[in-house]
Amino acid sequence: MATEGGGKEMNEIKTQFTTREGLYKLLPHSEYSRPNRVPFNSQGSNPVRVSFVNLNDQSGNGDRLCFNVGRELYFYIYKGVRKAADLSKPIDKRIYKGTQPTCHDFNHLTATAESVSLLVGFSAGQVQLIDPIKKETSKLFNEERLIDKSRVTCVKWVPGSESLFLVAHSSGNMYLYNVEHTCGTTAPHYQLLKQGESFAVHTCKSKSTRNPLLKWTVGEGALNEFAFSPDGKFLACVSQDGFLRVFNFDSVELHGTMKSYFGGLLCVCWSPDGKYIVTGGEDDLVTVWSFADCRVIARGHGHKSWVSVVAFDPYTTSVEESDPVEFSGSDEDFQDLLHFGRDRANSTQSRLSKRNSTESRPVSVTYRFGSVGQDTQLCLWDLTEDILFPHQPLSRARTHTNVMNATSPPAGSTGNSVTTPGNSAPPPLPRSNSLPHSAVSNAGSKSSVADGAIASGVSKFATLSLHDRKDRHHEKDHKRNHSMGHISSKSSDKLNLVTKTKTDPAKTLGTPLCPRMEDVPLLEPLICKKIAHERLTVLIFLEDCIVTACQEGFVCTWGRPGKVPAEHFSCSQEDRMQGVLQDQD
């Protein structure tokens, strides 16, 4: 791991860093903040968040940026690496009283140059639908806080929907809304739809359709974040109880779970092809989980405090033929491999499947992801071949490459995966950027099962539509939750008994749900740089830059190598050397 020197150098804010792609450099003129540029006193306020949308206008400058700072919400034209930010002309600015914005999300499906739908969640539990271009506030949901009084932790539009959105709260509940429906003037009454281990899904009982369409009750503590898979079929949720839960969005079934090393999980993201999930949290680690195998395949240690955001870089993540001279495909296909777009999942999965075949020229895979934390550091990580596909010559019999001893679980597998007999625990692994992994399970069989579940789930829950499927996702997120007071006492007691016996933290460590540190590869970051004075709360990878933000309210743009116009990024040889030196600090 790149370490920093002692004393003064320890607190020095880095403005550039070097990776194998070249020099990334902070662009001071592309910084967005409150118009007065005064650092925000972040004591006791909610995290700064950033949302982007492209309006697809003809001007070539269609990117829009929204961010919250304290009680304020700003909406700007985002000029990125091309031009300096003009903070004197926000398109829209709002200051709220009695509550603070906590999160927001644009509807990319309906966005135009004349109108855009922005959802904003608040600390008192409300959700507002606004159009910052028209400067209109169209609707307020949970206005009287009759649905939930706790802070909104995450709000997102349902992929592919113009009207459905999902809202998570610090109560551990999650609700599905339709913008076309009202919330009613009285507290909603619910009817149990489905329940499972430590979760329950309810529909709203009323004569006419009203919000929320569904309510999920899961786990103990807050549901901190959720993320849809690239194809929109699965939902990954992380909770304060320390669990990652992944749900099949169509069949409303739990696909797999993972437990943090300790403490709550705070953030989650999917790889561009939907094959891997990365989480971060209060254990200061990033954890990589295989969707197909339902197991932990690696952990990364580089942060010195809680990890607040994790994100994959789709523009650096690559799938390439091992022989660089020959590429069996068109130029367009090759670009698809290097730059995963909105349709990345299917094309990438087909190419990745070549890696498991017996073709003479295997596919080389490298995933890049990043993380930021309360330690004010940015870390970049590479997930490489030897972690993803260990024991290459034995790829067709991976489930038999290792044997586990009777008292030790297979490294990184989860409680939902089938334990392969005859595997032995691997020896302790040193810290490395790419370490071999010793236990692997079959990736193919599980995906085919998942496909079948999707097909059967669509017909079984056809009347429940998208909203029902989402609720299940949330349910599974809180596997350790024991408070199910709204369910009948008999079913609740039975459910809680199962939950407590299966998720006792003292008993999960060293099990497939939470493998020991020595049982899985330990990644080191490619770079680990202090880039802010206050805790970092945003990390977004764009095609020509990386965007970060800290709790002081500064949204920073880092130009990618070769992506910044010369007049905005005059990088001399001295600058490049300085970047290398900083990388060695």
Image (cartoon, helix red, strand yellow):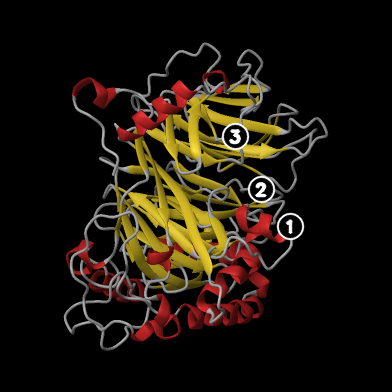
- Label 1 amino acid? Glu
442 relative position to 357: left or right: left
Mark with earlier residue (1, 3): 1
In what element is the residue under mark 1?
helix
| 3 or 2: mark nearer the eye | 3
Q: Position of residue 3 (x, y in %)?
A: 26, 37
Q: Are marks 3 and 2 in contact (CB under 8 Å)?
A: no
Q: Position of residue 32 (x, y in %)?
A: 55, 22
| 1 or 2: mark nearer the eye | 1
229 versus 411 height, above or below: above
Q: Disc 2 designates what residue?
A: 182
- Label 2 amino acid? Thr
Crowding at dot 2, Cα within 10 Å, few <14 / some 14-19 / many 20+, comes out as some
In what element is the residue under mark 3?
loop
Which residue is at 57% across, 23% downward?
569
Crowding at dot 3, Cα within 10 Å, few <14 / some 14-19 / many 20+, comes out as few
Which residue is at 40% across, 64% downward?
289
Q: Disc 3 designates what residue?
A: 562
Q: Quadrant of the N terminus?
A: top left
- Nearest to the observer: residue 452 or residue 583: 583
Mark with earlier residue (1, 2): 2
Q: Tally the marks.
A: 3
Q: Position of residue 242 (x, y in %)?
A: 31, 57
Q: Disc 1 designates what residue?
A: 332
- Label 3 amino acid? Gly
148 relative position to 522: left or right: right
Measured Cα–Cα span from mark 1 to mark 3: 21 Å
Which residue is at 63% across, 79% downward?
455
- Nearest to the observer: residue 43 or residue 326: 326
Crowding at dot 1, Cα within 10 Å, few <14 / some 14-19 / many 20+, comes out as few
Q: Quadrant of the C terminus?
A: top left
- Nearest to the observer: residue 382 or residue 209: 382
